[in-house]
Amino acid sequence: MNEQLIIQGLQAIVGASGVVQAEFDMQAHLVDWRKRHHGQALCVVFPASTQHVSAVVRFCAEHDLRIFPQGGNTSVCGGSVPTEDGRNVVLNLARMNAIVSVNAADNSMTVEAGCILANIHDAAAAEDKLFPLSFGAEGSCQIGGCIATNAGGVNVIRYGNTRDLILGLEVVLPDGTIWNGLRTLRKNNSGYDLKHLFIGSEGTLGIVTGATLKLYPQPKAMVTAMLAVPDIHAAVAQGLTLQQAFPGSLIALEFISGSEYEIVLKHAPTVKRPLTTDPQCVVLIELSAATGTSDQLVDALSDCLEPSIEAGVIEDAVIASSEQQRQDLWLLRHSVTESNVHEGMGITHDIAVPIYRIPDFVDQAGAALAEHYPEARPVIVGHMGDGNLHYIAMFPHAAWADVADKKAFQHALSCRLYDIAAALDGTFSAEHGIGSLHVDEMGLYKPRAELQLMQGIKALLDPANRFNPGRVLPGTNSSL
Amino acid sequence: MNEQLIIQGLQAIVGASGVVQAEFDMQAHLVDWRKRHHGQALCVVFPASTQHVSAVVRFCAEHDLRIFPQGGNTSVCGGSVPTEDGRNVVLNLARMNAIVSVNAADNSMTVEAGCILANIHDAAAAEDKLFPLSFGAEGSCQIGGCIATNAGGVNVIRYGNTRDLILGLEVVLPDGTIWNGLRTLRKNNSGYDLKHLFIGSEGTLGIVTGATLKLYPQPKAMVTAMLAVPDIHAAVAQGLTLQQAFPGSLIALEFISGSEYEIVLKHAPTVKRPLTTDPQCVVLIELSAATGTSDQLVDALSDCLEPSIEAGVIEDAVIASSEQQRQDLWLLRHSVTESNVHEGMGITHDIAVPIYRIPDFVDQAGAALAEHYPEARPVIVGHMGDGNLHYIAMFPHAAWADVADKKAFQHALSCRLYDIAAALDGTFSAEHGIGSLHVDEMGLYKPRAELQLMQGIKALLDPANRFNPGRVLPGTNSSL
């Protein structure tokens, strides 16, 4: 079937306006937001219903087309744009953006997959509820993408990853079957729990079209604080103390290296300098409570920190006493990515290790950089409470320009750091997923038995390798 | 190969004392604890290591033997004893009972699958930590069985089901492959999350041999209370208020019908009558906190309950002010199962519906019993906070003796109640699993797409249908 007939066939399913094929209009869907990954496609399809998705999938199966599901296109791993080869269709869920229902008594919400995460926050807040998934891209990412990638973020320490916030799913399978698993049950031991197979599978096993989400009461009290400590050992020790003291209340426990802190203050003009000292390491803390007052939380936090302050381990501390101060502290944290772009060429590693091994990782990674890449500076930001660091080898632009084979250089550097993480029982991909960027690492670092199981499941559900080929699993980019 | 050679082959793997074949010695492993399900086997094998398990599995594959993994044999669904036909080997994990390590800083513990749940509690407590999974059988059930069945219990409302407490697994697959997924990472988005496939699969996809568990700080303050309310509507309304008020602190929210309350007081001589009235409905509450005092919790709970007490909705309330009083309240709750056995023939239904629909379920189920089974009395106990009721149609022994075809009678009654649960977006099996008892319901109540996916996964992992045949999925009891 020629290209024009394919377009017509897809238009017959989703309507003429639901198929985009002009080069210019497709552009935003073929390149990731950081402009690092490029792909091509015959068209971008915008289904308006689950039935549309199913019909498009069946149509693509009949006509040997590959399908690349896409949400807000905020992947940092090349997971949300198609490959450069093959007969590709991008399937973007943006039109399926209805908040279907919010049930306050059930602490649940049902949404279509194309809902923007921030809109879900607002819909929950309107019922005095909290949907706690939160991270930088929340203003543009779609919940379907969050589910497909099991997104993490800043509140995982208290509320878990996306996986932990999903009660039920609706999924379209590679043969076009619609599985309606939209349930809000807290307990349901009737057979294998299929939703967990699709969550985090990055669109390679099915297309998430809808979800039932877990809601929480809105916290009534909150306190945010920033601490300066001399080194990563002190930062982790303080973090462990806080985790032990506030298991139900500690909702964020972030780490920012002194280098990162200075980069943000240098490049982000709206960020205020919160600490009076020049910190070696910064810890950002947030506590919340469903009852009591923020003042009570401030008191409890102060009591917990006091011994370390008196011992001089905490060199400086600021506790936000107003919502504005709170937002100022978070603005510093959320200005990291953009500031780093201005600073130089940062090679980012989204590693996780057990929390108590973070100091070992930072020490060993720092030594490796100093020995093998003296031009690079370690810049670190991350979700310390989850053992998850975004560890960045920051090269001055000039030094990076001198590197001949950039891809090989980057791969060698990254593997050095991933080896350190692996030796500390860690992972090379904590929350950003695999996409196309880390497929090689899957082959290098995953146990063989595990990889074979994954490949078997992929072949079972998608024997034609039609959904997101070339992503997640090695050996799946054979063009149809 | 004849039976004696099979025994010798298995003895060569696990040692002579690791194979039990005498009828008398096998008996405890071929019948469930309530003596409702019977099976037979060539022998019961007790491996002492993961390597043993793998070798036994390979041996059974070579010699066309079916394997029935067994933990503490505390299933209430016939999930832990073998079938009555077939060349069966029971594989009991009791010897693999080592607490491998407890890491307080990491809030994690690594255990072998045969560890008794209560021993895990103790090992955690020794490090001032909590492993929160808790239910009646905790003194004899093995953690491997908890994982295989995704056990629930009384603290799910705060800490989740077993699934939510597992960081990593070690599993032996049907081909003998050992998958070592023993990790303690809180974030690890590197491919499909395979552990969730095995959790709750009831030993049909793999044999859990080890696990890494999530620990929590031990609560420092606790309060337990029992309320009398006039009906299920008032009970659920009070429950929703408590959930909204204490999202991080409410760790148990149990419901006991007046009929159940009286049955316990009639048959359990050590249980004290906690309430001064004869309640229509009883709500059992437990709150805990990592900081503060129990007195503060008592005050907070009293404040929350006060409006309902003043309005007369709460007709009576007792708040445990000592550990002894607390244990007395829980003794009433935990004496339910044994007391019911004395009372009559109880047909139990482990249903769940969204919490706000519990009153609808109770009303409709009560009406159905009154209309079709006037001899039966509704007796209800359950985990109200999870929407999970154990709804019991209690027949006097004499009336039950008059029923001709008991199996058909029971099936018709149960389906009437499951239909009501299903129409309220509920499930016929909330926390007890499927075992052999509910295989028919899987065929009746699960969507076809879901059942096909499960059957595909079973065929992929266990093409010879060797692991726990006849359990969970319809059509899997073809004898080897």
Image (tube, coloured by chain):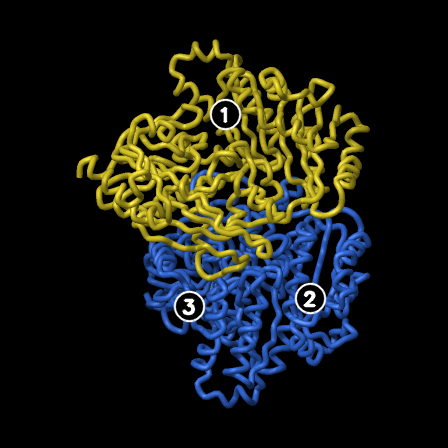
Chain colours: A yellow, B blue
Spatial CA distance of label 1 from label 3 is 49 Å
CB of mark 1 within 8 Å of CB of mark 3? no
A383 left or right, relative to A27: right
Whether B28 is drawn above or below B48: the answer is below
Residue underneath mark 3:
B439
Q: Name the residue under label 2.
A: B283
Is there one chain holding both mark 1 and mark 2? no
* Picture quadrant of residue B238: bottom right
Q: How many marks?
A: 3
Q: From the top left corner, tell me how far across and down residue B458 is, in percent.
A: 37, 57
Q: Which of marks 3 and 2 is nearer the N terminus?
A: 2
Q: Mark 3 belongs to which subunit?
A: B
Q: Residues within 10 Å of mark 3 (few under 14, many from 20)?
A: many
In the displayed structure, does residue A64 sit left or right of residue A17?
A: left
Disc 1 target residue: A348
Q: Can residue B437 be seen in this view?
A: yes
